[in-house]
Amino acid sequence: MTQPADVIIANAKVFTADPTQPQAEAVAVQGRRIAFVGSAAAANEWCGPHTRLIDGQGCTLMPGFIDSHFHLLGGSLQLGDIQLEPVTSPAELSQAVRAYAAAHPDAPWLVGSGLRYSVMPATEPLTRHHLDAIIADRPLILMAYDVHTAWANSEALGRAGLLAGGEVVAPNSEIVRDAAGLATGELRESGAYDPLLDLIPPLTEARKYELLKLGLAQTAALGITSVHNMDGDAEQLARYAALDEVGELTLRIYLPFDIKPDTPRSALIEAVAMQQACQGEMVRSGCVKFFMDGVVENYTALLLDDYTGQSGLRGGANFDLEHFIDMAAEADRLGLQIFVHAVGDGAVRRTLDGYAAVQQTNRVRDSRHRIEHIELLHPADLPRFAQLGVIASMQPDHAISNLSSSDPWPALVSNRWADAFPWRSLHQAGGRLTFGSDWPVVGQSPFAGLHTLLNRQPWAPGLPDQRLTLAEGLIAYTRAGAYAEFQEHRKGQLSPGMLADLVLLSADIFTVPVETINQVRPVLTMVDGRVVFEG
């Protein structure tokens, strides 16, 4: 007799992401693993006196979403900042900052997160003078939604010694100055704004815990069961491991070791130590993260051609090719997986060139090295992803759905629209795609990403249609995400023996009009056989 299941979800439209059994009606869970996938009638054999029966009501049951580009701790800690994502005008910005300042009269520094570059008119960049008019007696720093630019008022700049301009030694960073040589208040990349962040009093451990738990709760409510965290060190790894030890971690985390331009080659052994410290079911390491360039919006993304209307300006890079090859070859030799942030087509090409050189230096292996973002890609580099076995880790909600958006991105590279966010082109060229959000750069919701993926329109006649099908998108959020972290035999699809990470949705997602797919929500999320959200 079959040993009874702990949970059976039946009467569902099961999207398994398993190519050998794409669809089913029911799933049975025993302990931490899936025991059965098949018909509702056959699922009855797994029912016992203590089995919990859940009626799927004809809605989609699918593997839990794997967000392949996420910042769990950073995004969670931002939940305590001034929330600027909804802000669309200078008046709304002033209102949001003043309301927060009034509600937090004892906060020594005021910090905002999520600000859009389009908050100001294109002809009037945001400066310290605008911020001084909002609040001048306390230091104020506002972070762009992509965390690649910050704006500070005069009080903050003065405390950091940057009002007269200061000196930036980090590559690809800039304190923007006015004609008199004074700081305008705009700080591009971390090398410019880190001196201000270093002055902000750190949060207490109790507050960090509170905010992290809030971030985890939001993630569970969106059906996300695993994340590839795109920043990391031994301290952050230990934080998640401690949560796991007491049963409070509600999603699986794959965490890299950060490599900065000044990281010595010898420090890579720390990444190996992190890998050895955590290789459990919930918290894992074994990878490293590079930043090759910045972002298009502040001209720090490395391009092959000039930015529109900016003769000779092609952005910059944090690593020259030789430096990257040296560090990447050592990481690869140590058996580590490599993630590289590369937004511009120049940065993508440099990373691909580096990976090719690493393969010549070291033996070719199943490395599954990755490039993160790929917002611009030269057509000549399309086939190289398949040729080199490089994974394209992309974030659909970074793309601008149409030109009615106030986002400045399209205007800055208007001669390269055909090569922007090339999901379909990469897929057709045989590249492996995996999707994520890049939270808190955009919201956590995979349904928002699917909405952009399915509804994006070409920005001009004759441009390629880069949309994917819903099934292709779901695979990129599930099975492909598992592959991108060497876990395809353990999760990412619903089949017997797989880890019980799954999500039951509020509708049959395949019958929902694509225009409203962002309104679909999870009604139940299960991680490791445990229900972590129900509503």
Image (cartoon, rainbow, N blue to C red):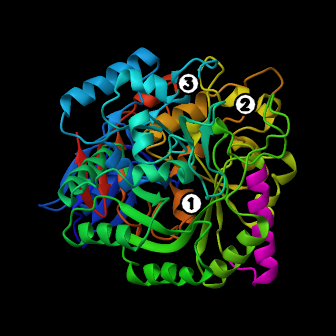
Residue pictured at 33% horizontal, 52% vertical = 41
Residue 485: image x %, image y %?
Answer: 53, 67
- Residue placed most toward the observer, 151 or 375: 151
The magenta stretch is 346-365
Labels 2 and 3: the sequence-earlier one? 3
Q: Name the residue under label 2.
A: 412
Which one is in front in this view, the residue at disc 3 or the one at disc 1? 3
Query: Is the C terminus in the top left, top right, bottom left or bottom right quadrant?
Result: top left
Which one is in front in this view, the residue at disc 1 or the one at disc 2? 2
Q: Kindly report the distance in space between the C-alpha atoms of the residues bearing marks 2 and 3.
A: 13 Å
| Predominant SS along the magenta part | helix
Q: Reply above or below: 408 against 222.
A: above
Query: Around disc 3, counting alpha carbons within 10 Å, would you say few (fewer than 14), some (14 to 19), or many (20 or more)?
Result: some
Q: Kindly report the distance in space between the C-alpha atoms of the residues bearing marks 1 and 2.
A: 45 Å
- Side of 98 where 443 appears, left or right: right
Q: Using the rendered image of the protein, determine whether residue 468 is visible from the camera's viewpoint.
A: no
Element under disc 2: helix
Per the rendering, the mark at residue 118 is: 3
Q: Kindly report the distance in space between the C-alpha atoms of the residues bearing marks 3 and 1.
A: 47 Å
Per the rendering, the mark at residue 20 is: 1
